[in-house]
Image (cartoon, rainbow, N blue to C red):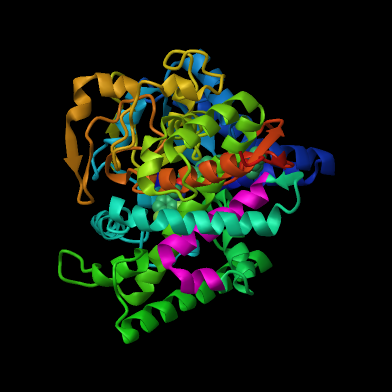
Amino acid sequence: MSVIKTIVQDALSLATVAFETFKNLALYQQIFITLSIPFIYSLTWQFLYSLRKDRAPLVTYYIPWVGSAITYGMQPYDFFEDCRSKHGDVFAFMLLGKIMTVYLGPKGHEFVLNAKLSDVSAEAAYTHLTTPVFGKGVIYDCPNWKLMEQKKFAKVALTKDSFIKYVPLIKEEIMKYFDMAFKGNKGTADVMKAQSEMTLFTASRSLFGDELRSRLDESYAAMYSDLDKGFTPLNFVFSNLPLENYRKRDAAHNQIAETYLSLIKQRREAGEIGDKDLVDALLKNSVYKDGTRMTDREIANLMIGVLMGGQHTSSATSSWFLLHLGEKPELQEELYQEIKNVLGDREDLVYDDLQKMDLVNATIKETLRLHMPLHSIFRKVMKDLPVPNYSYVVPKGHYVLIAPGYTMMSEEYFPNHKEYQPHRWDDVKSIDGGISLPPTEASGKASTETVDYGFGKISKGVSSPYLPFGGGRHRCIGEPFAYTQLGTLLVTYILNFKWTSVCPPVDYTSMVTLPTQPAIINWERREKK
Ligand code: X2N
């Protein structure tokens, strides 16, 4: 007992001496010491960490807590390339207080996307980002089995029968937009503005019906914009602050959810529940396997989540194909010929036509190869997790990160990887309602094996280098909708315009990988032959 007492007394007197010494220093010396303590602590910690053989090599950083955020945040793929040349496919880095273990390449895809449910969690990684925007009880604000069921409920509105109905609606929205925003015979267009608006109009018209689409022309557009501004990577760090934009986000969320709720009530009271869209699908079929039912508010929140997800990813993708095609007039002509060959003299466009347009689909596919919307996919590690093929263990509380977009831009798997070449996909057919089989995967026998996590069969293997829609239990269910929406958009653009542009560099700091502003196309109307 007295030994402890002596130690405590010694420590106290030592601290007193240190404090007195510190007080007598000049101010600049005091400031310097105060700033160096976390710095020295961090470097010491990094040194001790580097001695552990059971940890992935940690990228050295100099700003405590911030870590490699700036180099990673500005140019993630260059950062990964640089780390890979020093450490190999597996390394760790500090990102704003979180330790992220990266596993690059197809083996990494398998490691993270097919990890056991009890080992890693997507909801723990994403809930700060998504829940303030989508609302409670859905997507990443519920146990994983509920998400699997929500995907099953939503998928009812993402089948061939639905798309047959959506294509004419999507086309009509696009034509209305062209009449409104592309006046005259030639002009310039702000690609991101045009594609954000067209994506919102086409998705809400097809998935939510005429009632909600018509409201977008009124004051509701401003609400969507407020909510949209709240869907930002900043949420990973601060998901709630007493600031104006956060208040606007929350107000917009509530108003939009109320709007969806009133539509739900209206349809139910009028007994108008058919099978025309996502709202109908969710009203008819949203009882969980344990017998509980999604509340109307949860249905409204799921609608917000689905729309938000599709909005950012699809508008970025169509912006990118417009910008790339603007640099390749000959490709626009080839697309025009393909479309004319399929349509003949017909003016209309139907779902089956899109399935016959190989180059249109290959153009979308190639756009996603060079511009995977999510440059990083995270999971939070819930149990100490050994890294296959390595002696490392990722401890509970750290994160794992993969970047299929990095692999999709590697020379190893995609010769001339920098070139935008839709024709590289010529001998691959890939639109099959959710199981997208790239050449490398399609040629291996693993591709035929499927697994069902509760929302339909998907490819079991996820070690393909081409995974723009992810894989495993969190695999995107929006792929066939995206191809339908983007295909209709591309066909309608090609039939009406010719355009030129200069493809801008990528902005990696937003929710999705976007063209740096300003991104414009110079368009002229195509003469009808
Ligand atoms: C501070 C540079 O800027 O120094 F939406 F129903 C709906 C989305 C996952 C985004 C990851 C990191 C950016 C660091 C910037 C639905 C359709 C979904 C799927 C550092 C100094 C949501 C992470 C964004 C890294 C960029 C999560 C999406 N299909 N949508 N420093 O998605 O699916 C949904 C699902 C993610 C990210 C980043 C920095 C279902 C800086 C400067 C600053 N990213 N990001 N979805 N960074 N700096 C979604 C998955 C789910």
Q: Is residue 284 above or below residue 83?
A: below
Q: Is residue 460 above or below residue 314?
A: above
Q: Nearer the viewer, residue 83 or 526?
A: 526
Side of 113 where 503 appears, left or right? right
Residue 432 point in image, percent of width and height:
29, 38
Residue 330 point in image, percent of width and height:
61, 24
Q: Nearer the viewer, residue 205 or 376?
A: 205
Task: Please name the residue shown 27% across and 44% down the image.
Answer: 473
Side of 321 where 339 appears, left or right? left
Asked if residue 202 lies in the magenta stretch, the reply is: yes
Q: Is residue 7 visible from the viewing direction of this image?
A: no
Our reading of the magenta stretch's main secondary structure is: helix
The magenta-colored residue range is 191-214
Task: Please name the residue shown 40% across and 49% down the image.
Answer: 350
Task: Please name the residue shown 70% across and 42% down the image.
Answer: 34
Side of 529 where 290 appears, left or right? left
On-image quarter of the C terminus: top right
Q: Nearer the viewer, residue 192 or 168?
A: 168
Q: Is residue 63 above or below residue 224?
A: above
Task: Please name the residue shown 47% across and 70% down the image.
Answer: 210
Q: Is residue 35 visible from the viewing direction of this image?
A: yes
Residue 412 point in image, percent of width and height:
44, 13
Residue 218 point in image, percent of width and height:
63, 74
Quarter-wise, where is residue 479 in the image?
Answer: top left
Quarter-wise, where is residue 65 in the image?
Answer: top right
Q: Nearer the viewer, residue 105 or 443?
A: 443
Quarter-wise, where is residue 25 in the image?
Answer: top right
Asked if residue 465 lies in the magenta stretch, the reply is: no
Side of 479 where 283 appears, left or right? left
Q: Residue furthest left?
A: 290
